[in-house]
Image (cartoon, grey):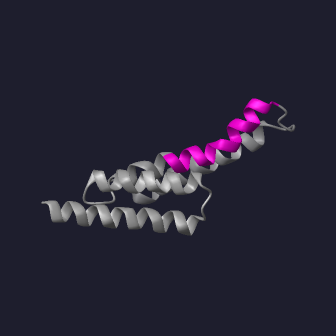
Amino acid sequence: MHNIYIYILVMAGVTYLIRMLPLALSRKEITSQFIKSFLYYVPYACLASMTFPAILFATDSMISAAVGFIVALIAAYKEKSLLNVALFACAAVFIVERILEFAM
């Protein structure tokens, strides 16, 4: 006798509380540099933690995924545009996949 609407309601409530509580509990401006910098980097850390596992398992081989990831890091470090980073990474994965396919 599981009702999916109860599950959805509980999830909505938890999501709302997580987003509402910090606003309700902090009435004054945050002055701590540590907390400000922590809150500044939280979205980037969450995005990286969700994206990295997907990168490693998105291809047929973990080797090609690692090569694509390294190429993307190098292109991003050299301040290429997001489109160029994605294109370089895709090209690297494609080339490595073809090499691995030919080698086997």
For the point 57% across and 44% down, which residue is it?
45
Which residue, as the protein is rendered here, is positioned at the far left? 104
For the point 77% across and 42% down, which residue is it?
24
From this view, report whether residue 87 is shown above or below residue 60: below
Residue 91: x %, y % from top left: 39, 67
Residue 33: x %, y % from top left: 79, 32
Asked if the stretch drawn in magenta spans residue 42, the answer is yes
Q: Quadrant of the C terminus?
A: bottom left
Specify start and end residues of the magenta stretch as a single range: 32-48
Residue 29: x %, y % from top left: 86, 38
For the point 52% across and 63% down, which residue is it?
85
Image quadrant where residue 100 sits: bottom left
Image quadrant where residue 82 sits: bottom right
Asked if the stretch drawn in magenta spans residue 40, the answer is yes
Q: How many marks?
A: 0
Q: Residue 55 or 19: which is nearer the viewer?
A: 55
Residue 75: x %, y % from top left: 53, 57
From this view, report whether residue 8 is shown above or below residue 28: below
